[in-house]
Image (cartoon, grey):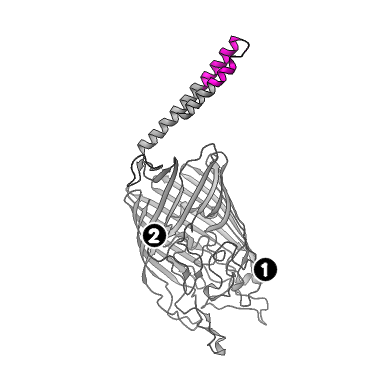
Amino acid sequence: MKKLFAAVFVCLLASTTLARADTASDLQAQMAAMQKQMADMQAQLEKLQAQQKAAAAAATPAPGVPPGSTPVMVAPGTNTTFLIHGEPIQIYGLLDLSLDDTTKGLQSYYPTSMDGPVGNVGWQPAISSQSYVGLRSARSLTNKFMPQYQLETQIDVSSTSGTVNTNSNNDNTVKGALTSRNSFIGEGNEFAGTFLIGKTDAPYKTSTARMNPFANMLGDYGVIMGNTGGDNRVEFGTRLDHALWWNSPNWGGFTLSLLTSPGQNRGIDDDLIAQGEAGCAGGNAPGSGALPPSCNDGSYGSAYSGSATYENHHFYLTTAYELHKMVNRTSDLPDLDPRDVADEDAFKVGTQWTFFPGTSIEGIYETMHRYVPAFLTDQNERTRTGFWFAGSQAIGSHDSFSLGWARANPTPGDPGQHNTPTLYPNAANPTLYGTPNPNNMANMYTAAFVHTVDSHLSFYFDYAQTLNHPYAHYDLGAGGRGLTTDCHDGTELAAFDPTANAGAGGVSYTGPHCYAGGDLRGFSSGIRLRF
């Protein structure tokens, strides 16, 4: 009411000035105009007061807080949305825990290496967590620019949060730390789209995410799609840090998404950790897997990613492209040849059809390239094509069944694994590096059954198999799985040892050993709780 009293005071003050007007008609006209302004002000004040009363009546106070004593309220609805000083903020998350049983599917002995894998490489049960929690703005876009933000982190429900330190992978990133997942702030509206800054799943990844009914399960399509070498890392299906991106409005079913991520790397060959980061770009820490202690196993500089999609009723079509500049893979060569630094890119096109409610099929074709000099073609395992087919069928109102098939086609070369012969320059072949035209095709097959109790709770059971040809070493679980099953055995990690004899070169142990050609298989049953 203070605003109303102030308005009346201003009007009274103005009326004393108007009394000096030359004619009565001018005075009457001005008074009528001011009365209309006062009426409009009163109407706006009454509307605002009515909105505040309605919000207070509809909201539920936080537990233990007397009604009307706090500006924090829980908004009605199925989502966990709070009103803080009238601003909607949503808390969301996923708790996903599963019991897995997987095998590496390796042979007991390999003539090519004259040995066999060490440790338990057969069936082994394990508990895996694929969980996260986040906080984000919950306002829908209008024709005015409105702030957008999100803070999201991984939740390690079944294990202790910390850095990764296994005999095949070391990473300084604490994935269970605050905002380890997609986190950003930006502005946007319904006409200009949204402009954001932070870190996020790249457009190349999100463009086909809807075509992956096995997301975060064993047999997630990230085992093959976007995975150039078959490791646990998915190079072209990942989150990009320190990024700027724009998501367009929906233009009659057509949308664009464009992202750039500056490298922030002071190394000439991107062999340093990028400024502000905990690990090497592309995953891992310097020296991971007993490699030389620098970022030389896939670290890259700047990255660019974009996608274009079109959706119309039951039809969805997308195409996407991503480029990584100056990717350092000098660890693929015994002499750390500095010429093994090159750009890598990927392109894909995907489509999805929904024939009627509950039935869908999807397919993706992908091509990836590493642009190395000609003399390194024989060790280039990063240039290849691949595809993905999947279908899902609803069974009643609560159940669904899905099938998937992914294929990684052969590459022009192979840098060699523990049990695969590798040829380097010699008198007979002075320009040969690696193995030309290796038989490194791989197929992955996945089947999953999901029972949905309601919009929050579901149970799933799935089976997946990655069948590698003799030179291939694709894993099982890459793409978002808490635990992965890969090609490495239990050989102790190689490390510098000053007590080792001269014949050992001051190094103890020889691990890790990656055995190509594995027939990886696994079963998984889990529970998902969304909020």
Q: Position of residue 117 (x, y in %)?
A: 45, 79
Q: Amino acid at mark 1?
A: Pro
Asked whether residue 136 appears in the rendered view, the answer is yes
On the image, the x and y values in percent for residue 5 come to 48, 26
- Residue under circle 1? 373
Nearer to us in this view, 215 or 5: 5
Looking at numbered disc 2 in the image, what kind of residue is underneath it? Ala
Where residue 212 appears, x then y in whole percent?
45, 55
**Mark sitting earlier along the chain (2/1):** 1
Q: Is residue 34 above or below residue 137?
A: above
Q: Are marks 2 and 1 in contact (CB under 8 Å)?
A: no
- For numbered disc 1, what is the local secondary structure? loop
The residues colored magenta run 12-37
> Which quadrant of the figure has residue 217?
bottom left
Q: Quadrant of residue 524?
A: bottom left
Mark 2 crowd level (few <14, some 14–19, many ≥20, 10 Å Cα): many
- Residue holding disc 2: 447
Q: Main secondary structure of the magenta part?
A: helix
Q: Is residue 469 magenta?
A: no
Query: In front: 474, or 174?
Result: 174
